[in-house]
Amino acid sequence: MADAKSSLDKLSEKSEKQLFNSKHKTLALARQYGIEGSLTNVANTTVLARAKKRMALELSQKQHNLEQIMLATHSECGEDDAAREVDPDWMTAYLRLAETISSKNMQTLWGKILAQEITSPASYSVRALETLKQMTNREAIIFQKLCQLSSTFSGDPARKIITGYVRLPSSFQLFTPLHSQKLSLGKFRFPYSNLMLMADLGLIYQSELESGEMSPGQPLNINYHDLPISLVPNGKRLKLYYYKFTQVGNELSKLISNDALVEYVEELTLMLEREFQVTSSIKSKA
């Protein structure tokens, strides 16, 4: 009797393991997507019948996805928001791209996009939608961090990530080495590989850029997540280094809401104070 109970326990344990092994998972996925015919040797149906079943499952899932996105859109819209006409070609492209979005978080983002387009058409290009569609959840998290590091300059809405500065030699010091300082974004859990990934997705430009030469005593006003920062060069021939968002990156950044990263601004301020008068309210806000 004890041997029989032991055998049953082993059989039960084996069955539990089988529920989680890769073969069982393969079968579960095949059934979920209606492509299990060859695995289960279904004799009473034709390949065509099984194909129709799979297509019905796929259409049903796409319909469900779009309905969830419309629900998210409706939640984003306010009764006092004035509506505009949405371009029908844009809407066709939007539906084609959105129908396979099944993640709840991503459905919320797509709902925000449509809600914005209803009140302010041409806010998001089809190219921006295509970029968002191909982004994985991990890439979306990295982009969120990228946005957290970004700021805008007065008079220029394009987002930038300031990484340092350079003082150019004067005309009679042509062979003098450049005096420059760079901030490592890796200190803020954003390694160079992430920058290249964002560039590959077309969200930022591949190369680090330089600003124009800044005028001594003339302030550059920077907006970092609604916190003002003012830079006043202490001398001539100073430029800033930065990575710049592309048009697509700027469009998609409107979907992201971030708090200021205090460590980044504090570290950046310490570096810039060597050549600039820096005024920032971020420390008092921290």
Image (cartoon, helix red, strand yellow):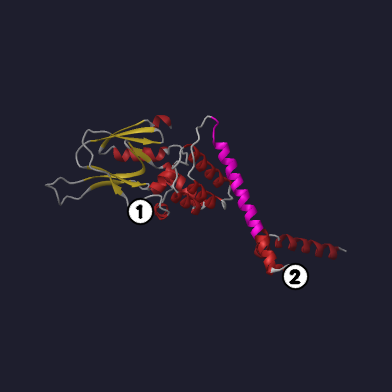
The amino acid marked with disc number 1 is Gln
Q: Quadrant of residue 250?
A: top left
Report the residue at 70% width, 65% height from top.
Answer: 49
Q: Earlier in the sequence, mark 1 or mark 2?
A: 2
The numbered mark at residue 206 is 1
Q: Nearer the viewer, mark 1 or mark 2?
A: 2
Image x and y of residue 33, in percent: 65, 59
Magenta segment:
55-79
Whole-number angstrom distance, CA of label 1 to CA of label 2: 56 Å
10 Å neighbourhood of mark 1: few (<14), some, or many (≥20)?
some
Contact check, label 1 and label 2, Cβ < 8 Å? no
Q: Is residue 163 above or below residue 225?
A: below
Residue found farthest to the left: 172
- Give the SS element for disc 1: loop
> x, y percentage for residue 200?
41, 55
Residue 21 visible: no
Majority secondary structure of magenta residues: helix
Residue bearing the label numbered 2: 43
The answer to if 77 sits in the magenta stretch is yes
Q: Residue at x 36, y 35 (%)?
A: 223
Element class at badge 2: loop
